[in-house]
Structure formats: C-alpha cells, structure tokens
Image (spheres, rainbow, N blue to C red):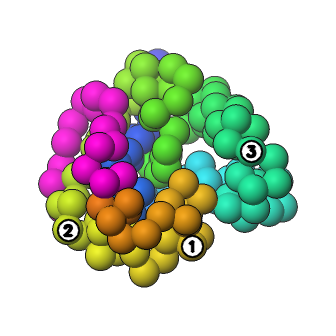
Amino acid sequence: MSEPLVNIYLIGFMGCGKSYWGRKLSQKLEIPSCDIDHIIEIKEKSKVSDIFYNNGEDYFRKKEYQVLQDLISINEACIVSCGGTPCFNNNMELMNSHGITIYLKASKEYLFNHLKINRKIRPSIAKLNDTELRNFIDITDIPHPLFQICI
C-alpha cells in the first residue's frame, strides 16, 4: 500500500510570487498546481476584489476555508498557492498537518515596489497611499510555516 500523497502549500506576503512559483514547482515536480483565490473566482464567477467589495471579507474567508478543506480531502498531491489563507481560522494548522507548508519570503522593498503598481486589484491595500502601504508591509506577520525560502 502506498502512502497518501501530500500537498505543498506555498504561503507568503501578497505579491511575493506564490502563484508564479507554484506553477514553476508544479512543472518541475509534474504535479498539478492550485491557486485558492483562482478556485474561488471560478466557483463564485467573480474576481476576488469584487467578492470582497460585494460580500465582505468574512464571506471570502469562509469560501477560502471551504476550498482548503476540499483540497485536503482529495488524496492527490497538489502545489497550493494560498493567498491570505494561513492568517485565518485554523488554516495554518490544517496545512501543516496535511502537507508541507513553505513560506516564500521577499524583501520589504521588493514587496512595496511590486504591490504599489497593482494595489488596485488587492482589496486589503487598494485604498492605501504609499506611506500606508509601507506601514502595512512592515507590521504584517505570517503564521509559522514548516519551511522558509527567501526569494
């Protein structure tokens, strides 16, 4: 009997490259990649930013939790790009107990430069000016992953 396959969960600050590196790792390991935000957009037939604005963050976080539960219940390995998932509910514990969690760490300067150009599509920072965005990056913390990779 073979061992059950585990997911690899990519977490990190918004804009650090979870989706990009998820696709690259998926190609290298020859296993599928899943992006929780993208799955929610397909199920809801709406962009994440619209879901936030129309239904609120609590609604979105419930959908995020449901998708995570669905991915855990499928006994097929997948590279999972997690967005804000680890910061809510008991999602971090779920990911750590049902797979390998890898934190992608980017410098604050990289994050600031990347996010300021596309902040309008990110509901939690869309209305922040540059100073507020820098402060947001400085004070936000990610729960404890199993592994950390600096990019």
Q: Is residue 144 shown in magenta?
A: yes
Residue under label 1, please give it.
Answer: 120
Number of residues whose C-alpha sits closer than 10 Å to that of mark 1, classed few (under 14), some (14–19) or many (20 or more): some
* Among the two numbered marks 3 and 2 on one chain, the one whose residue lies closer to the N terminus: 3
Q: Is residue 151 left or right of 29 when viewed as pictured?
A: left
Number of residues whose C-alpha sits closer than 10 Å to that of mark 2, classed few (under 14), some (14–19) or many (20 or more): few
The reply to whether residue 21 is visible in this rendering is no
Q: Position of residue 22 (x, y in %)?
A: 41, 59
Residue at x 28%, y 28% (from the top left corner) = 144
Q: Assign the C terminus to one quadrant of the image.
A: bottom left
* Among the two numbered marks 1 and 2 on one chain, the one whose residue lies closer to the N terminus: 2
Q: Position of residue 56 (x, y in %)?
A: 74, 45
Residue at x 75%, y 62% (from the top left corner) = 50
Residue under label 3, please give it.
Answer: 56
Magenta stretch in the rendered image: 135-151
Q: Secondary structure at mark 2?
A: helix
Q: Nearer the viewer, residue 78 or 111?
A: 111
Q: CA distance from mark 1 to mark 2?
A: 19 Å
Position of 68 relative to 113 (above/below): above
Position of 133 relative to 145 (above/below): below
The reply to whether residue 139 is visible in this rendering is yes
Q: Nearer the viewer, residue 112 or 20?
A: 112
The three-letter amino acid code for the residue at tag 3 is Gly
* Among the two numbered marks 1 and 3 on one chain, the one whose residue lies closer to the N terminus: 3
Q: Is residue 131 left or right of 82 when viewed as pictured?
A: left
Residue 109 disc label: 2
The three-letter amino acid code for the residue at tag 1 is Lys
Q: Is residue 129 left or right of 146 when viewed as pictured?
A: right
Q: Nearer the viewer, residue 32 or 21?
A: 21
